[in-house]
Amino acid sequence: MRKPSSLAFRLIVAAALVSVAGLVAGGLLLSNVFRESVERQLDDRLIADMENLIAAAEPAPNGALMMMNAIADQRYDTAFSGWYWQVTPDEAGGEPLTSRSLWDKRLETAATATGGGLARGYTSGPQGQELRYVVRRISFPDMAALSSGRQDARPKTYLFALAADRAKGEAEAQNFDTTLLWSLGALGLFLTIATLLQVRVGLRPLAKVQERLQAIRTGKAQRLEGSWPREIAPLADEVNQLLAHNAEVVQRARTHVGNLAHGLKTPLSVLTNEAALVKGALSDTVMKQAAVMRRQVDHYLTRARAAASAEVIGVRTDVAPVIGELARTLEKIYGNKGVEYEAEIAPGFAFRGERQDFEELAGNLMDNAGKWAATLVKVSVTELDGRIILTVEDDGPGLNEAELVRVLEKRERLDEKVPGSGLGLGIVRDIADLYGGRLELGRASLGGLKADLNLPSA
């Protein structure tokens, strides 16, 4: 089961609640309808038997009531069969006529019937069964009074009652409920499976969007391409417009950074050239401060450009080609001092960032190693937990703990005799920070400095 915050979980739970509520309501309704139908059938049977019983009743000359041909159903003649009839006179002291099935018992009926109307109810049988009964009040002429010539003779009324055991109907209802329960359970299972399939199929375009966005983030795609359903198409269009706007903003920022670099470097070059023409303390001061300004401009312009690049979505740089090109170039530069670059990088490693930023990162480390190496610079790349680790080692003198602090944190230049701005490692650390990476320095197995650069992998 998915976690509660997921859209699929909400859809499944909502559908399940609606389905359960519908099935429970439908089940209760069907159960009640079936029970009412069973009871109605029982009432119809009792009413039909009552009609036969009333038809069989005849007033006797002595004023009593005779049952000429009672109901032919054998159940009314079997003792305590669960089917009973009883005819009770309204006059006090009158003995009721009963079916043989009642034996010496009597039916207690609480409901009363007026006129020719019918009344229904429940009562207890001779053996404690729950009985369903119907009663009707019927009037017959008083034959004894009529024979004696009495003009004020009134008809005699009798209460006809028939009852039947509800056990069989209740058993049928329970069997129906059991069947209904299993049927609704199977239907609920089917609806659950159908809901799961519906949610899975319905949300598949969102999973496709996620895959395409991941491809964009890792640099495998530039846009959210594909054929989308009508509900997802506006989202895809908005994402593509956002990516295009992001790329446009980054490109504009790069252009401004480049213009600023040219705008600052040209005046600095003029100052440096003019100061070189004049000898003296002022000239030396101008030259030195101009060099500091150039280094600072290079540093912050590089940082600004890298910050803009780090915001670009979907950029990807293959590591092996960049390292190979840098190694060949730097080997030509430092080959005159006998330094060789050993850089055998397996294909497949990729940096999630701009190529020029990776060139800046790897180039500074490899260039720094070439400056201090005696004979060998070794470059390797590994991958760990979705990140690449670029390792650059040299067999030079290396740095102690105090020197590492001065180079990385204080950004000091340890040897002015070695050409360069002295900000290479600091720039590497700044650019790495922008990409969520980190630079670690230590002692190499070759004896010199070891630089481990941890960067996001594409």
Image: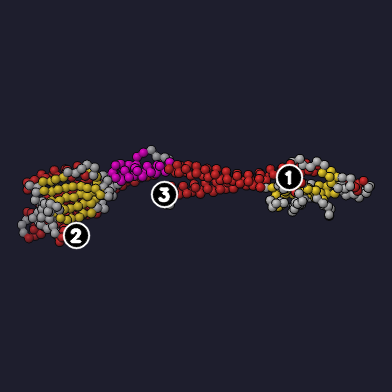
Nearer-N-terminus badge (2/3): 3
Res. 46 image quadrant: top right
Given the current orientation, which residue lies at the most extreme right position?
A: 149
User: Residue 397 magenta-drawn?
Assistant: no
Residue 64, x across and y down, in percent: 86, 48
* Residue located 81% across and 49% down the image: 158
Mark 2, residue position:
409
Nearer-N-terminus badge (1/2): 1
Residue 59, x across and y down, in percent: 86, 45
Distance from the alpha carbon under mark 2 to that under mark 3: 47 Å
Q: Is residue 411 among the parts visible in the rendering? A: no
* Residue located 27% across and 50% down the image: 385
Mark 3, residue position:
2
Q: Of discs 1 and 3, which sits in the foreground?
A: 1
Q: How is the image coloured?
A: secondary structure
Residue 195, x across and y down, in percent: 47, 43
Span of residues in magenta: 201-226
* Residue located 12% across and 55% down the image: 398
Three-letter amino acid code of the residue under disc 1:
Thr
The residue tagged with tag 2: helix, strand or loop? loop
Distance from the alpha carbon under mark 1 to that under mark 2: 110 Å
The residue tagged with tag 1: helix, strand or loop? loop
Q: Of discs 1 and 2, which sits in the foreground?
A: 1
Position of 426 with respect to 141 (left or right) is left
Q: 427 or 211, which lies in front?
A: 211
Mark 1, residue position:
78
